Amino acid sequence: MSAATGPTVEILPGIDALPAGTWDELAPPHDPMWGREVFAAMEHGAIGPDGYAYAVVREAGRTVAVLPLAAVRGLRLDQVVGERERRLLAPVRRLCPGLLRVPMLFCGNFLGQGHVLSREPLPGPVAALLVRTVLDHARRHRLGTVVLKDFAPGELATLRPALEAAGFFQVPSMPDTELALGYDSFDAYVAALPAKARRNVRSKLRKFHARGDLRIEVLADFAGLVPAMLGLYRQVMDRADQTLDVLDASFLRALHRPGGPDQRLVACFEGDRLVAYLLCLFRGEGAIGARIGLDYRLAHEAHLYHHVHYAAIELAIGRGCRHIRFAQTAYEPKRELGCALVEQRYALTHVRPLPRAVLRRLLPRALETALARTLAPRS
């Protein structure tokens, strides 16, 4: 379409093709995972996607919408399902591993909550143009399944007419966890917790400080710790139900280079040895504990998971953050920390009718069952 008749769209090959000012104007101002530097680090790393692109809609010479795209040509289905489903798929993985690899196009943020970057809800013609462009891009690159990943229900609602017209359907995804802050101090935060949670925090802190062999440090420069971080991260990923993305050294170093995002490493040491960490990113009034690593040799005994989260909360409070988000795992301890669950959804389709019909019939029930099992309280 020409500029005279309505909006136009262009696929850009990388974040550097987008002006920094345009990105900063449209991106969520308090979501650290939407810093331009995070997307640049993703493009430099080897975390899962085989390629990145950005669908950019312009109208009257003005950028009105940006949707990041990440192509994964051989997504392993057995790595993105729960433990029970993975056991069922084990014979297929042994005999015909190629059947479990599917090409997919992820729309939004491969590492965080999904958004279409815009100043306001998209008008119908702009939304329809954007959806058509995404599907055309998927067909051109032979990416059968298209997923708008981890979008808030309200944001998907504004896109719903365009998505439904294109054959998309919605299913639940794992919720994020978010802790509202606004406290004057960490002690004030603890005091505001329910009685049982408050006792647990104080008990764990007393036992930690009584040990003498462990200490927490908050580091701005942690480049020398990257190899140790990856070793601890692999221990966590080896125990994870789902492994859509896997961070690598190139991503962490790109994230940590000059001009990278505002970040700190909450690090726990046993002597000189790193035994736990939580990588924290900041943007505006928001913070996120982006990725964690644990030494399971003493993680449970010393409650390392809890202590790096306590330190991250204290750090975010000290920086004046209004909220801090954590990953889509370990819901019970995060509820005890006072986190609320943030509902998120996928919008999916397939570029061919028959696979689309199969996905529509089977996927909603499977994901709803997996979600209920994950969120159910454990004895």
Image: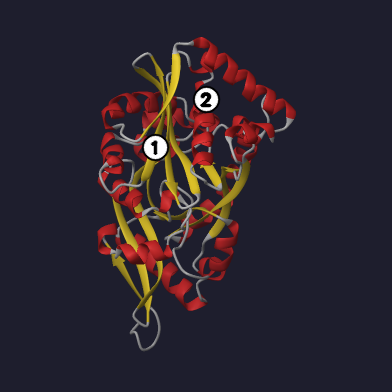
- Is 309 drawn above or below residue 284 in the view shown? above
For residue 362, which numbered disc appears in the image?
A: none
Of residue 334 and residue 171, the one placed in the foreground of this image is 334
Taking 31 as reference, is 373 above or below it? Answer: above
The quarter of the picture where residue 351 lies is bottom left
Q: What is the x, y in percent for residue 312? A: 49, 34
Q: Secondary structure at mark 1?
A: strand
Identified by mark 2, the residue type is His
- Point out the image quarter for the N terminus: bottom left
Q: Nearer the viewer, residue 255 or 220?
A: 220
**Residue 108 seen in the figure:** yes
Q: Which residue appears at 37% of the width and 83% of the height?
A: 60
Q: Secondary structure under badge 2?
A: helix
Local crowd at mark 2 within 10 Å, few (<14), some, or many (≥20)?
A: many
Crowding near the residue tagged with mark 1, few <14, some 14–19, many ≥20 C-alpha atoms within 10 Å: many
Q: Residue at x 68, y 30 (%)?
A: 377
Name the amino acid type tagged 1. Answer: Arg
Identify the residue at image location x=56%, y=55%. Answer: 152
Picture coordinates of residue 83 (x, y %)?
52, 29
Q: Position of residue 149 (x, y in %)?
A: 48, 52
* Residue at numbered disc 1: 264
As drawn, the residue found furthest toward the bottom would be 4
Seen from this angle, which residue lies furthest right? 195
Residue 326 shows in this picture: no
Q: Is residue 192 above or below residue 170?
A: above
The span from disc 1 to disc 2 (Cα, nearest Å) is 15 Å
Say left or right for 211 vs 203: left
Task: Specify which label sits upstream in the sequence, 1 or 2.
Answer: 1
Location of mark 2 (residue): 307
Image-quadrant location for residue 269: top left
Q: Residue furthest front?
A: 184
**174 left or right, relative to 79:** right
